[in-house]
Amino acid sequence: MTDERIALGTARGRWVLAATALGSGMAFLDGTVVNVALPAMGEDLNADVAGLQWIVNGYMLMLASLVLLSGSIGDRMGRRRTYVVGVIWFGIASVVCAIAPTLEVMIAGRVLQGIGGALLTPGSLAILQTSFQHSDRGKAVGAWSGLTSVAAAIGPFVGGTLVDSGYWQLIFLLNVPIALVTVLVTLRHVPESRDESAGGKLDLNGAILATLGLGALTYGLISAGDHGFGDPVVVASLAIGVLSFAGFIEVERRSSHPMLPLSIFANRRFTGANLVTVVVYGALGTATFLVVVYLQTGLHYSALWAGASLLPMTVLMFFLSGYAGGLSDRIGPRIPMTVGPLLMAGGFLLMLRIDNESSYFSTVLPAVVLLGLGLVSTVAPLTATVMSSVADHHAGIASGVNNAVARSAQLMAVAAIPVAAGITGNAYRDPVAFHNGFGKALWISAVLAASGALIAWITLGDRSGKRHLLPAEHHHRHCALEAPPLADAHADLSRPS
């Protein structure tokens, strides 16, 4: 690792911050605009519900599978180099998405975007951690949080405007100049760093099995919507997925440098927090996937208005997460993480009132606000619990695991819940069929969220009475809706448990 440390207040420090915020902001922006464009893409690419699921899940599949491995790659190959490769890859994949003539090419482009996202997502915070003086790291993370929050907040407006213009392809082409500027600034101003102590082989076998397992299960669940669970291809896909995960666990158990150290799950609080993550983010991912589509196809919202409809959640999380984190420090995470999922369940149930005659301010907004308050109460305490449940030198891997768990949960939920709710085929084009399925999906999401409250109450009781604190700067970190935040340090991702 380079010995060069940069002060945030210098010109170079501001350039380093800009480089990391631009790349991360591009990924956050892309995450908020794609759902807005789904109905338009579905029409132009002749995609059914399964096709829309794959447009979302193609990206999430690779991100969930590779985000842990990419931290280790950065440690060994150089964090700046890995970040630049990720940004370039993401930009090229965005062009593939923009010019995609068919659904299949679009899905391939989204898969490629996921690989780029997995390379750049952990890299931005790792660069901040290794580039800045220790006294400036908290301020750098806070500034990065604010800048990327702006990207996430403006995403629905930018995406909606571009989609309403008649050219949804522009939401992907927008990434190209951002990627170009990010690469130029990074190469000119960001110092290279690597972990010279990182040893052992990359866990490629684990990454391959994780990708195969998640991919096969996703394919099987989505295909079951059209062909039924008795279809031989569906059965084979699900079987391959289960066997791949069994192999993954065995590989991780035997590996001296595992991508996922299984020993960290021996901690009851860590396991409990990740179980809460599974059900809460699975429910959230399904709801955000369906709500934006339903508002456009069922209530005939414009893409801009549909995208902006969920903005209050982002605003609430940005302004109130610090207070929720402080409250969790004082009273422990058990109560906030029990109340939060219950509020989320209430938000999902309030969404049952939405129909084709609903007013946004009297029907949609109250549900979105309640859902946002539930997220506020849940996410900061969850992050604190995850990172305080392991030794300090494993904080990065614990955060990375939790981030991957959240993305995997959303991947599986977006594949499974619409099928369980009967939203298959071209149901999203049929207002009556979509309304009925939407209601069932909301009930499933509400049950999942409520189960998160039960899990938190059972697993997070602190018999020792000790507080599990997270440094104050972590409470203010931006959290994208698709996953909890990653830790600043990723050097420990390559080290064995």
Image: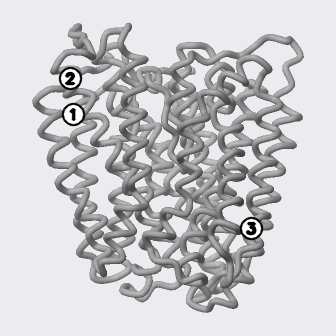
Quadrant of the image containing the N terminus: top left
Where residue 441 sits: x, y (%)?
Answer: 73, 70
Name the mark on residue 130.
none
Q: Residues within 10 Å of mark 2 (few under 14, many from 20)?
A: some
Per the rendering, the mark at residue 442 is: 3
Q: Nearer the viewer, mark 3 or mark 1?
A: 3
Q: Is residue 281 shown left or right of residue 140?
A: right
Residue 402 vs residue 347, the one in the foreground: 347
Image coords of residue 414 (percent x, y)? 61, 65
At x 66%, y 15%, the residue is 469
Instruction: Please name the residue that numbered disc 1 is placed on.
Output: 81
Earlier-in-chain disc, 3 versus 1: 1
Q: Quadrant of the C terminus?
A: top right
Instruction: Give the residue type that dot 1 points to.
Output: Arg
Question: Nearer the viewer's eye, disc 2 or disc 3?
Answer: 3
- The amino acid on which the numbered mark 2 sits, given as a three-letter code, is Glu
- Under circle 1, the secondary element is helix
Q: CA distance from mark 3 to mark 1?
A: 43 Å
> Relative to the observer, which residue lies in front, 186 or 32?
32
Name the spot of residue 141 as percent of width and height, x first: 41, 25
| Pointers 3 and 1 in contact (C-beta within 8 Å) | no
The residue labelled by disc 2 is 192
Q: Residue at x 50, y 45 (%)?
A: 480
Q: Secondary structure at mark 2?
A: loop
Kind of residue at badge 3: Leu
